[in-house]
Amino acid sequence: MKTLVSIALLLISSFSLFAQVTLPIDPTTNKVSYTEVVEVPGMTKDQLHAKANEWLAKTYKSANDVIQMNDKEAGKIIAKGTTKSYLHSMGKDWDAGYFRHTLTLSFKDGKFRYEFTDFTHDGTGGNGTVSMGPVEGEKGAGGMSAPNTKQWKTMKEDLDKRMKAIVEELKKAMISTKDSEW
């Protein structure tokens, strides 16, 4: 009987581990942060800067509205962007607003660093979705009409999936050796 109870407890704790959202947390700031230094041998700082500008223009609706700082000499771009938020419920994806973020790109010869951070949820009011605030919150800051904890976790899981895809798109664009001359 003890063995059966132990197995049941192990299964329950295993399921709860899978249900938890594990977003990457910066140990210094305690904020969610997707960051990495990516080696790009043979590329100059200026070439990487140009590729990043092209990627921003193709990725965001209006790069001019998104880019807050663009310093080619310093090898740095700071952008404020959004990614769509969805709430998965009743077998359907519901519009749940946007996650705002800050993207900092830094360049040196042969490498670049990206950091996506400062994630905050802004609800659209549609489907009863209100602004939930910083993603680091366990329950969100939305108050009475806010999604429940399970829904908030689902929204953060969706954010994690989307950010990983965006990071892969950025890395692919930056590493690409296609000559832009035609």
Image (tube, helix red, strand yellow):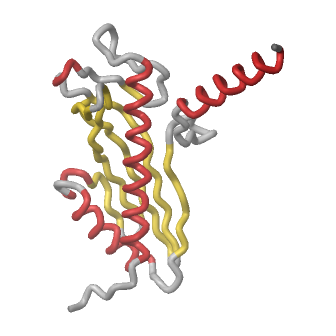
- 48 in relation to 21, above or below: below
Q: Is 144 or 71 nearer to us in this picture?
A: 144
The C terminus is located in which quarter? bottom left
The N terminus is located in which quarter? top right
Counting labels gives 0
x and y percentages locating residue 165 in the rendered image = 39, 55
Q: Is residue 144 left or right of residue 27?
A: left
x and y percentages locating residue 106 in the rendered image = 46, 63
Q: Which residue is located at x 38 percent, y 64 percent?
A: 170
- 9 in relation to 143, above or below: below
Query: To which quarter of the image does residue 53 belong?
Result: bottom left
Q: Is 148 or 83 nearer to us in this picture?
A: 148
- 164 in relation to 6, above or below: below
Q: Is 118 or 178 nearer to us in this picture?
A: 178
Q: Is 28 or 14 nearer to us in this picture?
A: 14
x and y percentages locating residue 56 in the rendered image = 28, 62
Q: Which residue is located at x 19 percent, y 51 percent?
A: 65
Taking the view exactly as shown, the residue that stands out farthest to the right is 2
- 125 in relation to 161, above or below: above
Q: Which residue is located at x 40 percent, y 70 percent?
A: 172
Taking the view exactly as shown, the residue that stands out farthest to the front is 1
Q: Which residue is located at x 31 percent, y 88 percent?
A: 179
